[in-house]
Amino acid sequence: LKRTSCGSKAALAHWWFCRSGSVEMENMRILDTAADRKQFETGLAGKRLLHVKGFGSGIRNATDAQVEMEAEQQGEAVSVMTDFSPDYLVVDGDPWGVGFQQHIKAFVALLKESGGLPPQLIWARHVAMSGSGGVPADERERSKQVKQAQQWMRELAISVIIFWIDDAQISAKIDMLYGKGTAAKLEPERFSKRGIVRILSDTRPAWVSGLASSILECIRAMEDVQRQTQQFFEKCSFENSAKGNAIYE
């Protein structure tokens, strides 16, 4: 290497850069077509999938008590994931962050430290699809989302599968769960907008009657007027529940 010319050094650096990208892509699988996704789903028979969802950010300027509480919550989350022993973890196409993502990182680290085989990650992201082949319609948006999934792969050092979900499928699920026209009502609003849809209204969905009492009480608490500006679920809550249904189908 001491005798390497400047030109050869540049070539060597380029080789390492390309090799690094190659290794990274070896640990990532992008299911770009409807046929790819169908084939992948067929292979999931008998596998254990755990859909993980939570807040994407931690508490800013946390007090000692809050830090202790977050550590306790992380311990509980890791325990649940360990007990379930998933073959695949599924996340909703969130960017990497310092919230629930850290619970997943702690779980994967614990598995590796104990000599266990970590699960693969299914990064399920909703996008607009083209009319033919079920391919993402916007290449720029696709590239942006792939970069976000790559960040998960770098942070966790596990294999990642990108699974695209059609926006139209999410809209259909929202209408199925919360009533016809709900998706159109939500569409123009910000992700954090509250009160657009009320679950315990006079036209409540049929599935509400079958909820466990503990879940029903949680919904009542969320829609309680005493929560003031925090009353009701956010727009993204309805989108995420629809996405969860689409993922499990």
Image (cartoon, rainbow, N blue to C red):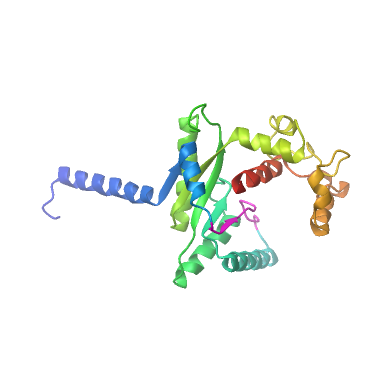
Residue 231 in sight: no
Asked whether, in this view, residue 199 is left or right of residue 116, the answer is: right
The residue range painted magenta reads 46-61
Tell me the quadrant of the picture where the N terminus can be found.
bottom left
Farthest bottom residue in view: 114
Residue 64, image x and y in percent? Answer: 67, 67
**At 29% across and 47% down in the image, what residue appears?**
17
Task: Compare residues 100 and 10 and report the one nearer the observer.
Answer: 100
**Residue 47 part of the magenta-drawn span:** yes
Residue 137, image x and y in percent? Answer: 50, 29
Residue 239 in sight: yes
**Residue 12 part of the magenta-drawn span:** no
Task: Compare residues 67 and 132 and report the one nearer the observer.
Answer: 132
Relative to 22, say whether 120 is above or below: below
Residue 146, image x and y in percent? Answer: 46, 42
Relative to 45, say whether 113 is above or below: below
Q: Quadrant of residue 176?
A: top right
**At 44% across and 71% down in the image, what residue appears?**
115
**At 64% across and 52% down in the image, what residue appears?**
55
Q: Main secondary structure of the magenta part?
A: loop
Task: Compare residues 20 and 43 and report the one nearer the observer.
Answer: 43
Relative to 71, say whether 150 is above or below: above
**At 58% across and 47% down in the image, what residue appears?**
92
Farthest top residue in view: 131
Residue 11, image x and y in percent? Answer: 20, 44
Asked whether, in this view, residue 80 is left or right of residue 196, the answer is: left
